[in-house]
Each structure stands twice: as structure tokens, then as C-alpha cells.
Amino acid sequence: MSFLYAKTGTRRSPAHPSPAAGRRPVHGVWWLALWLAVVGNLPLWQRIADIATQPAQRATLLLVMGGLVFGATAALLSLLAWPRVFRPLVTVLVLVSAFNTHFMWQYGVVIDPTMLANVAQTDAREVRDLLSLRLLGTVLLVAGPPLWWIWRRPVTWGRWLPQTGRNLLGGVSGLVVAVAVALAGYQGLASLMRNHKPLRYMINPLNSVYAATRLAADQLPRQVRALQPVGEDAQLGARYAQQPRPPLLVVVVGETARAQNWGLNGYARPNTPVLAQWQAKGLVNFPDVHSCGTNTQVSVPCIFSPLTREQGGDQTAEHQNLLDVLQRAGLAVLWLDNQSGCKGVCDRVPNASTRELKLPELCEGGECFDEAMLHGLDERIAALDPQRRARGVVLVLHQMGSHGPAYFKRTPAARKVFMPECTSNTLSECPPEQLLNAYDNTIAYTDHFLGQTLQWLQKQADQGTYDTGLLYFSDHGESLGEKGLYLHGVPYAFAPEQQTRVPMVTWLSAGLQQRSGVKADCLREQAAKPLSHDNVFHSVLGLMDVKTAVHDPALDLYAPCAGR
């Protein structure tokens, strides 16, 4: 930023700017800190007001927390008060605070490192679904006044050494304010933060600064390191020696389907009628399954990781994954995506996206319904390496599923069972019954899509081309207004069950049951046992008869029935 001065009767040297030339940085720091603390944290103040039921307790907590946020924000802004960078950086922080305010208020989300990573992976389609007039209004109200105030008058900067001293003094002063207020109200503040830990991720804009710092410190060093190989001893089992037909397993990675609204789990609405019919043909439902994360960015890599969640499978990947092991063993692997990507899981195997398709009846506006993944599937498999294909195929279909907030966009008009439905992406504006209709329609469409996939697999089996099977599970669940929460992404430790409990089903053709020794009746006897995403890696290896030391039979959901 260049030196700027007000016009005067005499010309002054830039080394000695006039006090009247512009606003001192210290004025911008403290006034802006006050605005961000008060207006930029309205969702935080609303949440604290809801928690504290007694007026005196509420007032005390708001004052203590407000002083803490004000001091900490002033300290941060003081350290940023340098020519050429102050106003651009502050502009970013103000805009980030405004966007955070909207999403925290409208959807009940919090801003932590995993949420920020999820934001970084968001594609244009997802961004489009989040745009609304209310978002524009929030940004204008929260960010408009301070940005106008910051940019309307020039800032007068001193020499670098005195400026350094002023910045350090401002930073120390802000910290003194924060510490003094925190000590004065320590008892109430400590109890509040201990019992309501998500509040720490609602402090604007410090939550984004912390999340970005943690994300960079965690991911950047790992990106320069090669992934550690997994299952280097992987080889195909004895069943492949003289197999009459190769196996074909379809793994469907669902999106945002929650177990609570899954018809096969006893949900009141009949939104899985097709799968209910397939139960008579060997389909098995698992009612007690928990996810590895609460967003796609965490859950998808964790699902295919050799590590369980407790072992760090929900952290940034340092190891190769299930698809690498299957390919190393000699099988053909294909990932087909109708979402925002595979989050690195499919980087080393053949993969494709529905964005390449031009199907007017299934794809429009850059987005396809899930059925588009079944279009030309025979040709896609035929294009795989013939030697690998002759041994066996694992096909992964990554759904758009029930991705919100624009649930109404996930289902074709002819497949809308429950009406009227919510057609707004500002979910809190919708009547609860209409929001539920829109969401349940996505589950019903997933039921239809899985039914179409099962028909295709049954056809492959009837033709004697493959011994076929299907394994479906959702990557995480969804909140639909319970406790004021919408969508997903709440840190796992605090996440409600709606975001962590997910549906899972499996189906094996008669040929694959014979080949593996896994019978549907036996699986049904085991179905009520608690399962999680931790089971997927080992279950697929076991069902596909891939021999490797990393296969853990204790986590293989098919293992108790194999060979019976």
C-alpha cells in the first residue's frame, strides 16, 4: 500500500506525513475488532444466550466471552497492520466472517479444520446450491459497513521501526484485554467451554484462522511425501485357479443418507420399497452402522483406508488404500463418480466422471442423476484391462445421493413420491414436513437407483458373465433441523447420531454365494451386530478372496459366514 495524504496548502515529505492525512492503523484495528466481535459473532451470542437460562448468568457470559473475543481479535489485527497488506487481509477476514455467520446461523455448522477442508473440495455445483438472497443479505449487512469504513479513507503509516513497536504494543494490549477478561470470569467461562466444546469453533474470524493454520500444518508436509504402500503381499486366493466365471462386485458409496430415514430400518415411510422386494432375493440390511466422519472429505478416504478410525483412518491419508490393494492383487478396478470427486482414493486406478456424459434425460446444468452412472456400464467394463477383467472386477459408484441443501434437485420429477417438497436451499425457511418430503424423496430415488443396479447385476449373473454382488453404504448422515442443526460436518466428537449413523445393505448372487461360501441366511443372523466404515476395507478383501496380511477377519463382516 503506498503512502496517501490529504491535500494541504504545502507539500510535505512522505517521510513525515501529516496527522490529518489519513486514519492511523490503530483506529482501524480497534474499531474493526469491536465490529467483528459484536456483529461478526451473532450466531455465537445467540448460542450462548440459548445455553444460559438465567438472565444474570447470560449477561455475565456474554460480557466475558465478548471481551475475550474482542481482545483476541484486536491482537490478531494488530499483528497484520502493515502497509500494502493490512486492508487486503482484513477484507478477507471480514468477508470470511460474513460467510461464516450465514452458514453457522442458517445451518448450525461450525468452522473446524475438517469443515474448511470440505469447503476447499467444494465444486461449482455445490457452491451453486448454497447461493441465496439471504446469503447476499448477510454478507452485505455483516461485511458491508466495515469494508466501506476501511476503504473510504487512506491510512497513514509511519516508519517501519515505530510501526513495528506499535503493532507489538497493540498485539500485547489485545492479549492483556483477553486474558484479563478471561481471568475475571474464569469459572463461568471454563464451565461453558468444557460443557459446550463446539462453541470454540464459532468464534469469528479466529475459527477460520485456526482451521486454516491446522489444515496447512497437517496436509502440506504430507503432500510432499509418497503414500506408504499397503498389501504388498496381496495375491488372489485359490478360488481364482479354475473359476468358471470371474467375480464382479459393485461398491456403491452413498451420499448423506441417514439410517433414521431408511425404510429397511423400520422408518415409518415406505421409501425403500424396491430394496424391500430384493430382501426376498437375498438382500441383507444392516441396521446398526456408524460412519467414520461427518463429511465426504473425511469419510470417503477413511472408508477405503487400511486404518480404522481409532488408528487414524479419519486423518489425512498417509497410506495407499483398498483400491490399490485390489489392483495390486491383479483385479480390474474402476471408480465412477457422480459427485465432487473421489478425494484422492481413485487417483491410481481407472476412473471416470458423469460430467463427461451428455444425456438430456438424466443430465442437465452440469449435474446428472445417479442413474446416469449405469449408462454404458457394459462398455466401460469392457474397456478395462482384459487380463485383469478376466480375473475379476470391483466397480465403485459414487452417488450424488441425498446431497443438500438443494435436496429437491437430487430426484427426477417422475420420482418424487412425497409432496409438497421444500424447494429452497435456506432450509430453516421450509416447513419441516416439506423439508422431510424433499429428503425422503432422495432416499426413495436411491432405492430406485440401487434397484436398477441390482437388476443389472442379476442380468450379468443370469447370462453367466460374472458372479455378482453389491455392497452399499452411505458416507455420512444428515441433520434436518434437529437441535437447530442442518446438513452435516459437525466435529465427530460432538456430532448427533443423525450425522453418524448410516444405512448399509449387501446382496450376493447365487454364484457369488456358492463361490465365497457366504449365504444370505447366515448374513441375516449376523446383521444386527454393530458395524462401521472400519469393516469395509476388510470385508471387500475377504469377499473378493484377496490374500494379504493386512486383511483382518475380525473386521470382515462376511467372515463369520464364509465357508459355512
Image: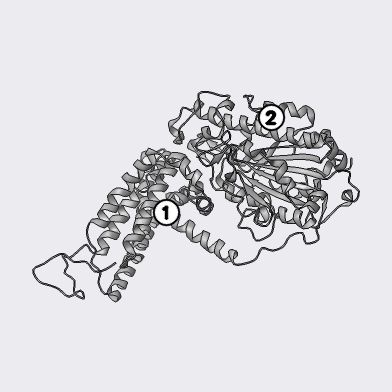
Where residue 328 sits, quadrant-wise, is bottom right
Pick the front one: 127 or 111 = 127
Q: Label 1 amino acid?
A: Tyr
- Image position of 227 with respect to 100: above or below: below
In the figure, is residue 64 to the left or right of 262?
left
Q: Position of residue 375 (x, y in %)?
A: 66, 38
Left of 114 or right of it: where is 562?
A: right
Please state which of residues 335 and 89 is positioned toward the viewer in this rendering: 335
Q: Which residue is drawn at 70% across and 49% down?
A: 334
Residue 448, disc: none
Q: In this view, does 420 lie to the left or right of 391?
A: left
Determine the residue positioned at 40% across, 43% down: 102
Three-letter code for the amino acid on which mark 2 is drawn: Leu
Q: Which residue is drawn at 26% across and 68% down?
A: 2
Question: Can residue 535 be seen here?
Answer: no
Q: Residue 134: x, y in percent?
A: 38, 38
In primary-sequence order, the first of circles 1 and 2 is: 1
Residue 437 visible here:
yes
Q: Position of residue 288 (x, y in %)?
A: 69, 37
The extreme left residue here reads 9
SS under mark 2 = helix
Percent of width and height locating residue 175: 37, 62
Q: 118 or 31, which lies in front? A: 118
User: In the picture shown, does residue 176 fall above or below 416?
Assistant: below
Which image quarter: residue 152?
Answer: bottom left
**Residue receiving disc 2:** 264
The residue carrying mark 1 is: 186
Q: Callout 1: 10 Å neighbours few (<14), some, many (20+)?
A: some
Contact? badges 1 and 2 (CB < 8 Å): no
